[in-house]
Image: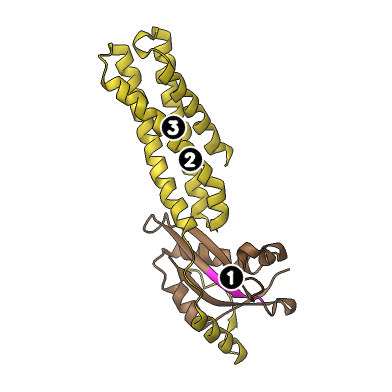
Chain colours: A brown, B yellow
Amino acid sequence: MSYFVHITDADRSYLAGLPLSDTAKEKVEDFIDYAIAQVGDAFRNDPANRTQPGGRYFHRDLLLLDVWGDGRAHRIDFVVNDEHAHVGVLIVVYVDHQ
Amino acid sequence: MATVTKLPIAFAETMASVLETSNVEALAPQEVSTHIGMCVYLQGLFAIARQSITERVSQGMDARTFAAEYEPALAGLEAILTTTQRIMTKAQTSVLPQPAEQVIASYRALMDDVMSLREFLANVVAKAKMPARPFDWKRAQEAEAAFARGETKPFERSAKR
């Protein structure tokens, strides 16, 4: 199953402004496509991936080495609300780059 | 741990163990060639391992998966370097014949590569294991409110950069 992944303008701007090369930013979009839009129930329901027990959020953390840019490893954490998953919608509530 | 990483670590561990227990000064010419050839071969394998890790993580991967897969490799590299330190200390305190010096020089070049891979991997594993920042309720509530007002849009890829 593939979900519609909703994302705010603020988070779109945040992603666009990350200190990554254009190619690395494409990899971030790939990750949203395959790791969030197509996330499996097993991953979402794994307590290790929930932000709190019984809560409505899971997180998906991307590790990316930007060999086209600064050559450094980056972590981009996506926190996602899945209370509308039953109707095929996930909401990225925020993104955090470390 | 992927085979491409596992194999050179296993071979290098064996080689370190053999070098530590053998009498380097008394190696026969054929043994000297074998040791030097092995060092060069292992340097090639470690270069392939590094390239493989770089290719995987530059495509982007789940941080926890990466840490689970490669943290054992880091422990393996640490173990090799610990044994190597003992070998080098012993070599520095002995007067070695020319062939033994050649073996130690080749081994030192191999260990420089192992050390470089260890530093690279330690840096990426540390990033993968970095704890998430505390949950940001404010941003979460703002995003949910935006969704409720119909202000969020389904994700679409950017136009080709």
Going 48% across and 28% down the picture, which residue do you hit? Answer: B13
In this view, B141 is above or below B18: below
Label 3 belongs to which residue? B80
Which mark identifies residue A51?
A: 1
Would you identify the image quadrant in which residue A3 lies? bottom right
In the rendered structure, are the residues bearing label 2 and label 3 in contact, judged by CB atoms less than 8 Å apart?
no
In this view, B114 is above or below B141: above
Which mark identifies residue B75?
A: 2
Do the residues marked 1 and 2 share a common chain?
Answer: no
Q: Nearer the viewer, residue B61 or B111?
A: B111
Q: Give the range drawn in magenta.
A: A78-82
Rounded to the nearest whole Å, what is the CA distance between mark 2 and mark 3?
A: 9 Å
Would you identify the image quadrant in which residue A30 lies? bottom right
Picture coordinates of residue B90 (x, y %)? Answer: 31, 21
Q: Which of A33 and A90 is in front in this view?
A: A90
Picture coordinates of residue A51 (x, y %)? Answer: 58, 70
Rounded to the nearest whole Å, what is the CA distance between mark 1 and mark 2?
A: 29 Å
Majority secondary structure in the magenta region: strand
> Could you tell whether A9 is left or right of A55 in the image?
left
